[in-house]
Image: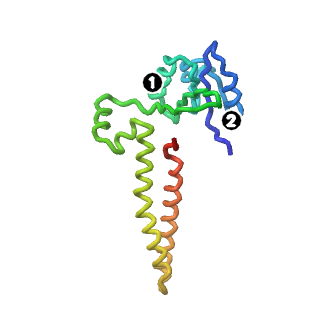
């Protein structure tokens, strides 16, 4: 099933984006907008647009990129800003998370605190934290699941105990599957 999230292409006047436009049109739900103002005000009818993927080609003026990051940091919703470079062989993308606006004092505290607190400040730090947490949870989870399965193999005639262990086993498997989904949230290999 295709992702229904809208895709917006920042396409200011005078910038040739025909190749990128063609690639993005194949993915569906593409809307071209000439500037950040149009994107965030809604342009047509003044309604705010649905949050989505915002593609910004490298040819776009850096002032527009700065304005987008600043504006999206004030918006709610799952906005994602993607800087697109054309490198001859195709396109490459650098995700630039607009994050959430925060006061200077809180930012400094997060930097000093480190760990999970700093993850909010950096996409890369967030990926590192998710990877660490996934690994740290997976080890005891595997042990708990193995112990539960061993207890289920013991010859017992207590149906209540067996049913309780089956519920625990089911829930541990569910957690394992959820943790497994986090594998996609890892830094790409160089």
Q: Is residue 100 above or below residue 174?
A: above
Q: Is residue 174 above or below residue 83?
A: below
Q: Which residue is painted at 58% across and 24% down in the image?
A: 57
How far, Cα to Cα, is label 2 from label 1? 27 Å
Q: Which residue is painted at 46% across and 73% down in the image?
A: 148
| Residue named by callout 2 | 27
Q: Badge 2 local density, few (<14 within 10 Å), some, or many (20+)?
A: few
Numbered tag placed on residue 87 in the rendering: none
The residue lying toward the viewer, choosing from 164 and 130, is: 130
Secondary structure of the residue carrying tag 2 is helix
| Residue named by callout 1 | 70
Q: Is residue 70 left or right of residue 34?
A: left
The residue lying toward the viewer, choosing from 53 and 19, is: 19
Q: Which residue is painted at 64% across and 41% down in the image?
A: 3
Examine the image and state in which quarter residue 143 appears.
bottom left
Identify the mark nearer the N-term, 2 or 1.
2
Residue 113 appears in the figure: yes
Q: Of circles 2 and 1, which is in front?
A: 2
Q: Residue furthest top?
A: 14
The residue lying toward the viewer, choosing from 14 and 117, is: 14
The percent coordinates of residue 165 (x first, y second) are 47, 74
């Amino acid at each position: 099933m295709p992702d229904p999230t809208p895709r917006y292409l920042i396409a200011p006047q005078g910038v040739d984006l025909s190749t990128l436009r063609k690639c993005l049109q194949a993915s569906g739900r593409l809307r071209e907008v000439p500037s950040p103002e149009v994107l965030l005000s809604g342009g047509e009818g003044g309604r705010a647009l649905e949050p989505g993927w915002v593609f910004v080609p490298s040819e776009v003026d850096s002032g527009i990129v700065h304005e987008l990051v600043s504006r999206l940091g004030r918006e709610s919703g799952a906005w994602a800003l993607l800087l697109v470079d054309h490198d001859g062989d195709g396109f490459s993308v650098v995700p630039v998370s607009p994050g959430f606006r925060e006061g200077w004092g809180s930012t400094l505290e997060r930097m000093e605190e480190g760990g999970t607190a700093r993850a909010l400040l950096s996409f890369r730090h967030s990926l590192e934290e998710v990877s660490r947490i996934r690994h740290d949870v997976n080890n005891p989870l595997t042990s708990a699941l193995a112990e539960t399965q061993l207890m289920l193999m013991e010859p017992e005639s207590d149906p209540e105990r067996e049913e309780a262990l089956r519920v625990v086993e089911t829930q541990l498997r569910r957690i394992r599957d959820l943790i497994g989904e986090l594998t996609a949230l890892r830094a790409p290999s160089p």
